Structure formats: structure tokens, C-alpha cells
Image: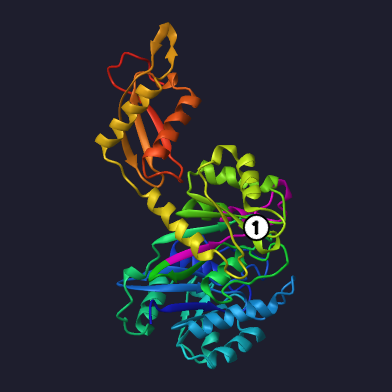
Amino acid sequence: MGIPQVAIVGRPNVGKSSLFNWLIGRRLAIVDSVAGVTRDRMIQPLEIEDRLVELIDTGGMGIDDVDRLTDQIEEQISLAIDAADVILFVVDTRTGPAPLDQIVARRLRAADAPVICVANKTDHEGLHAAADEFRRFGWEMLPVSAQQNRGKSALLEKLLELLPPPAADETEENLPEMKLAVVGRRNVGKSTFINTLVESNRLIVSQVPGTTRDSVDVRFELDGKTFTAIDTPGFRRRKSISGDLEFYGSNRAERSVRRADVVLMFFDAAEEVSKVDKQLCDYIAQHYKPCIYVVNKWDLMADRVPTQEWADYLRDTFRTAQHVPIAFITGQTGRNAKKLLNHAQMLYKQSLSRVATADLNRLVQAAIQHNPPPLFTGHRRAKIYYASQVATQPPTIVLFCNNPKAFSPNYQRYLVSVFRDQLPFGEVPIRLFFRQREGSGEKES
């Protein structure tokens, strides 16, 4: 059975995404006055006392999508309803019952799951009479206001009451052990890859640029372990972003990189590396995220370009990222997808690795003897007294020395290369800090 699911459904602009953000306590879903912002299902874990559920945000029922994706959006809504253990039917107290609410209600009467009518935007007690109008649909009605933080406790209490009894496999072990962000510019095949990964049409796939407007978390299992793949909107150059939706989408995608354990940076095998690709790779590097460069749609190029030529092209383009592994896949068929995921797990383990202080200091002393630190003012030599790993994700090493400014960028890169070669951090970013040891007689850097 697994973790129970709670689906949020309703017509456009009743505040479904606002309710979703309010319940999980984070602004993940894009909230905008434009109808049809939400297209894919967005799923996030929600703890209610001692129960864990998956909360699902869905697109507005009855929306006429401007990009002709109405059928796909409706399919995503149907999948959410069919899988739900409880359904939150969201309506708008301010506007009152609308004809489209009636259509949604008729659709939900055929659902197997219990339904709660959630009268959102009931911002004060004076609106309770208006909220009572929704009792005509026949379900228990709860007046709430996501914006004014009203009615949350009553809603969660009712949810808890309607949840099915806990199953044997409904434990925290079901929580994902690795979050995998799938990023890249538009139309490089990110959503197609995730759909293949989870073996279902979990995400809407289309040739319309910008189909994915939000970052969408997709849970899947591999070899008995649960993971989360984060599908992200296609990145664009900042000056090319037009409108609030693209701005929010880009910010969500950047936040997905920040909260990911490993990032899959997608390239189109038939396209040259663009300025957007370079900006995105820089962003990943700036946040010290383990990354794999994924050359997608390789089936289109395999007979024309050797893999080594494309790999060399990436190495020449990203000279400061020589440690980043490169994978060649076909997302549509799943070719090499499992190898890619296995490699991502290896990077995740590397990012969590810790090295004993004694072993680290022996390695630092050997590196210094092989290549002594540079001389600085007065022909004095820079000294490293000892080192310590202070954090993981990324592996972070502090070197206590006599003068942090004496260590040139070249020497710092030398030390990082030694750590990559000799420590279990071979393919992940390493953060290096130099600190002046107290009593060393040098000025603080």
C-alpha cells in the first residue's frame, strides 16, 4: 500500500497551490493569478501527527490550456484522483459556487476516495455564511484561508480521521534517500527521461518550449530503495525571461539545484553547448553540488560522432570541471538510464564520506613534501599545521596555516587534486578553507 496520498483538486484559481504551500509549510508550488499555472502533479510529503502522507497538487479542472496541453493536464488530474486515499475538493468562498464547481463535483462523486470540500479564501468569520453554500455538494465542508492561516488544524484533524489504517510498509523508510535534480535548457528531454525512469506518464511531455513550469518531485524505486527525481523548468538566459511565470519557474529550478543531493545536467546530443548551459553549470559549481553531465538523445548521434569526441568537447568547454563524470543516454528508451542512476548513487555516497583527521593530516604532509607551499614576503614559506574535515555534502576541509593569503589559487587546486586522487571524493566538489592558526604570528586574512 505504501504512503497514503491526498489529492488537491478543483477548478482554476480557487487557491489549490496556495493551499498546497500552506499545508506543507514551504512555497514550492507557483502561485499566480493566471489560470493554468499548475500543469503537472506536484507531490510532497506531509506529516500529520504520527502519520506521513503524500500531498498532491494538480492543475485546474476545465482549463483550456493555451499550449494545447488540456488533455495531458486532465490525464494528470485523473491519475491523482484514482491514486488518492483522500480528496480535497477546493472551492472559492469569495466567488461562491460556480458552474465549473458543479462539473468537478460530479466527477468526484465517481471517485472511490472520501472527499472533503475545502472552502478556501474564507478570510474572516463574516464569510462563513457564504462558505456554507458549498454544503449543497453533499460533502463535509471546512472553511479555511491559506492566505490568512485560518482553519488548518481542523482540516488536518479531518484528514487524519479519513486516512486508511497504517500499512505495514508505511514508515519513514519510504522517505527518499537521494534527491536527484534533472536540469538543463528547454527541450533537452528532462521530462521524457523521468517518465521512462518511473515507467509511467508521470510528467507531461510536449514539444512546446516551457511545458514544465514548476519543479516537480517524482518518487520512484530502484533496487528496493526510494528516490526522488526533481523535474525542473528549462533554464533560459535571464534577459530572455518574460513574465512572472518564467521568473518563478527559473527561481524554482535554481532552488531545486540547491536542495538536490546530485544534479543531472542534461545536454542535447544534437546541439552545441550554449551560454545557458554554461551559466547553469556555473550555478551548480557555485553551490558545490555533485553533478553528472548527461548527453541525452544519443541514439540520434551515435552513428555520426564518437562518444570520446563529445566527451572531449565537454572537457574543453568546462575546463574547471574535469572531475565531473559524463554519461551518454537515450531518455526515451531508457538506454543507460540505470547505469546513470547507479553512478549518481556513487556520487551521493562520495559527498557523504568522512576521512579520519589522522589520515587527512598524513596525506597533507605528504603533499607538502612532494610540492612545498610557495614563498611569500621576506622569503618566508607558507605553512600548513594541520587539517580537519568539518562537514559533508560537500566534503569540507579546513587547513590551519600561518598565512591564508600565501596559498595561491594554483596551490589550492593542487591540494584539491591530491584529495581527489587519494580520498573518496574523486568525482564530487570539495570545499577548501584556509584558516590562520592562533599564535602563528601572522595577520588574519
Indicate yes or no whether the magenta region holds residue 251: yes
In this rendering, position of residue 74 left or right of residue 427: right
- Magenta-highlighted residues: 227-253
**The one of 369 and 345 positioned closer to us in this rendering:** 369
Q: Where, by quadrant of the figure, is residue 68 drawn?
A: bottom right
Does residue 97 sit above or below 147 in this rendering? Answer: below
In this rendering, position of residue 98 left or right of residue 382: right
Residue 148 visible: no
At x 45%, y 60%, the residue is 342
- Residue extending furthest left? 358
At x 45%, y 88%, the residue is 114
Residue 407 visible: yes
* Residue 15 place in picture, x, y as percent: 57, 71
Does residue 41 sit above or below 161 in this rendering? Answer: above
**The one of 435 and 9 positioned closer to us in this rendering:** 435
* Residue 99 place in picture, x, y as percent: 66, 86
Secondary structure under the numbered disc 1 in the rendered image: loop
What amino acid is labelled 1 in the image?
Gly
Q: Which residue is mark 1?
A: 234
**The one of 63 and 224 positioned closer to us in this rendering:** 224
- Residue extending furthest top? 378
Q: Where, by quadrant of the figure, is residue 283 drawn?
A: top right
At x 51%, y 85%, the residue is 82
Q: Where, by quadrant of the figure, is residue 76 drawn?
A: bottom right
For disc 1, the neighbor class at 10 Å (few under 14, some 14 to 19, many from 20) is many
Colour setting: rainbow
Indicate yes or no whether the magenta region holds residue 87: no
* Residue 438 place in picture, x, y as percent: 28, 21
Does residue 314 sit above or below 125 in this rendering? Answer: above
**The one of 255 and 103 positioned closer to us in this rendering:** 255
